Amino acid sequence: MQWIKLFDSEAEAKSQIPVTRSKAVVVAGKEICLAHTPAGLYAVENVCPHLGDALSRGTINYLNEIICPWHSYRFHLVTGEECKGRTRPLKRFPLETRADGVYVQLPD
């Protein structure tokens, strides 16, 4: 596993991704979705496991879920589980805020 720096600070991350929004980023050749909720920042795969649309194009609700724009599948950002168990969970990636920035951990 490798830790990759995404932002120079948590404040920078939150300014680039407003609350209840998400953003696609490419990190080490892998596209991930960064989501910002009132509970914090999360990193998940950017592809909906149901039919493959980009989750970063979806919305975020008050339940800490990201909602796919195609078929409204809802995935909890903490667990990755789809709310009705209709498809596999999202792959999640740990985020860590350090003194020098915000990092994501990706598999090698």
Image (cartoon, rainbow, N blue to C red):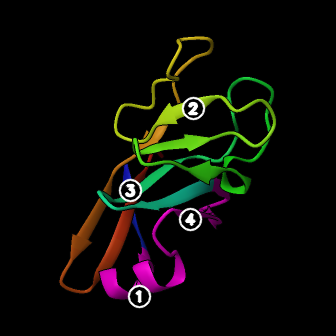
Mark 3 vs mark 4, CA separation in Å? 26 Å
Q: Is residue 27 above or below residue 61?
A: below
Of label 4 and label 2, which has the lower sequence position?
Answer: 4
- To which residue does mark 2 refer? 74
Of label 1 and label 2, which has the lower sequence position?
Answer: 1
In the displayed structure, does residue 77 sit left or right of residue 28?
A: left
Query: In this rendering, does residue 9 appear at all?
Result: no
Name the residue rendered at 57%, 17% in the picture. Answer: 88
Q: Amino acid at mark 1?
A: Glu
Q: Which of labels 3 and 1 is toward the front?
A: 1
What's the mark number on residue 2?
3
The 10 Å Cα crowd at callout 4, few under 14, some 14 to 19, many 20 or more, is some
Mark 4 vs mark 2, CA separation in Å? 15 Å
**Residue 28 in the image, given as x and y percentages of width and height:** 59, 62
In the displayed structure, does residue 9 sit left or right of residue 83?
A: left
Q: Amino acid at mark 3?
A: Gln
Label 2: which secondary element: strand
In the displayed structure, does residue 26 sit left or right of residue 75?
A: right
**Residue 67 in the image, given as x and y percentages of width and height:** 62, 41
Asked if the residue at tag 4 contacts the one at tag 1, i.e. Cβ–Cβ closer than 8 Å, the answer is no
Residue 68 occupies which quadrant of the picture? top right
- To which residue does mark 4 refer? 21
- To which residue does mark 1 refer? 12
